[in-house]
């Protein structure tokens, strides 16, 4: 029974980890190196993640700088940033690519909050799916006479407590991200 609980807990932690990764890609008013993490660059015919081609740094809260290690990659990196759905305009001076992060409009902030809520809902659904799998495993164990009926009920209570805890964590992460997005 403990193995079912520990396995389920790991899977629920994975769901919250995925939520955090999605949140990192959401643009707030501040510059963050994780903004460009999802960008794939066509590098000599191969789709390569931007962070494997260049160093990304944040000199101040409104600027990102990207310095490709290969001089031949400047054009590809610039095109990939323009094609991304981030709405950023890179400026290439031949040595470094600078991206100014414009302040977000109120309308765009509200859209981002909706996207964050969707990511949170996805995380909660994943947590609930893990709960369902855990309960099915416990019922199977009881059917196979590995645990008693009392153990089954205690196990299901533990699973529900675990689920409630992870749902609260997902909501708390959303609240923090929402505050960060709406902050001017």
Image (cartoon, rainbow, N blue to C red):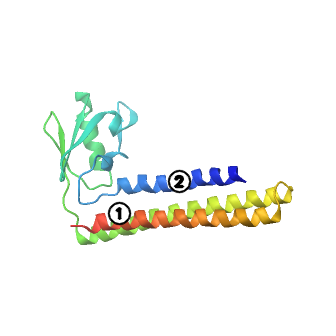
Q: Nearer the viewer, mark 1 or mark 2?
A: 2
Residue drawn at the location 51% of the way across and 62% of the way down = 122
Judge left or right: residue 149 versus residue 120. right
Residue 64 x, y percent position in the rendering: 21, 46
Q: In which quarter of the image is the N terminus?
A: bottom right
Q: Does 87 sit above or below residue 67?
A: below
Residue 177 sits in quarter? bottom left
Compare residues 92 and 11 and report the one nearer the observer: 11
Q: Residue 76 carries which label?
A: none
Circle 1 residues within 10 Å: few <14, some 14–19, many ≥20:
many
Residue drawn at the location 34% of the way across and 57% of the way down = 26
Q: Residue 13 carries which label?
A: 2
Residue drawn at the location 47% of the way across and 63% of the way down = 170
Compare residues 35 and 145 and report the one nearer the observer: 145
**Secondary structure category for the residue under label 2:** helix
> Which callout, 1 or 2, points at the residue further toward the start of the chain?
2
Judge left or right: residue 66 versus residue 49. left
Residue 95 sits in quarter? top left
Judge left or right: residue 153 versus residue 63. right
Q: Quadrant of the C terminus?
A: bottom left
**Secondary structure category for the residue under label 1:** helix
Residue 144 x, y percent position in the rendering: 86, 55
Compare residues 16 and 57 and report the one nearer the observer: 16
Residue drawn at the location 64% of the way across and 62% of the way down = 131
Residue occupying the far left of the picture:
93
Circle 2 residues within 10 Å: few <14, some 14–19, many ≥20:
some
Residue 147 sits in quarter? bottom right
Residue 132 x, y percent position in the rendering: 67, 62
Label 1 with label 2: CB-CB less than 8 Å: no
Q: Distance between the residues labelled 1 and 2?
A: 18 Å
Residue 4 x, y percent position in the rendering: 69, 53
Q: Name the residue under label 1.
A: 177
């Amino acid at each position: 029974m403990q193995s079912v609980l520990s396995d389920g807990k790991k899977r629920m932690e994975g769901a919250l980890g995925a939520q955090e990764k999605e949140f990192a890609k959401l643009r707030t008013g501040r510059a963050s190196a994780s903004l460009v993490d999802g960008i794939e660059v066509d590098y000599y015919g191969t789709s390569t993640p931007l962070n494997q081609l260049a160093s990304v740094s944040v000199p101040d809260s409104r600027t990102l700088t990207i310095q490709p290690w290969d001089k031949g990659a400047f054009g590809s990196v610039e095109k990939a940033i323009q094609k991304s759905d981030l709405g950023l305009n890179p400026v290439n001076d031949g040595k470094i690519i600078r991206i100014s992060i414009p302040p977000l409009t109120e309308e765009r902030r509200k859209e981002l909050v909706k996207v964050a809520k969707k990511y949170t809902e996805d995380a909660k659904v994943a947590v609930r799916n893990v709960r369902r799998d855990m309960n099915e495993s416990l019922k199977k164990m009881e059917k196979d006479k590995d645990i008693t009926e009392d153990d089954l009920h205690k196990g299901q209570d533990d699973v529900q407590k675990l689920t409630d805890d992870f749902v609260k964590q997902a909501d708390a992460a959303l609240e923090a991200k929402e505050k960060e997005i709406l902050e001017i």
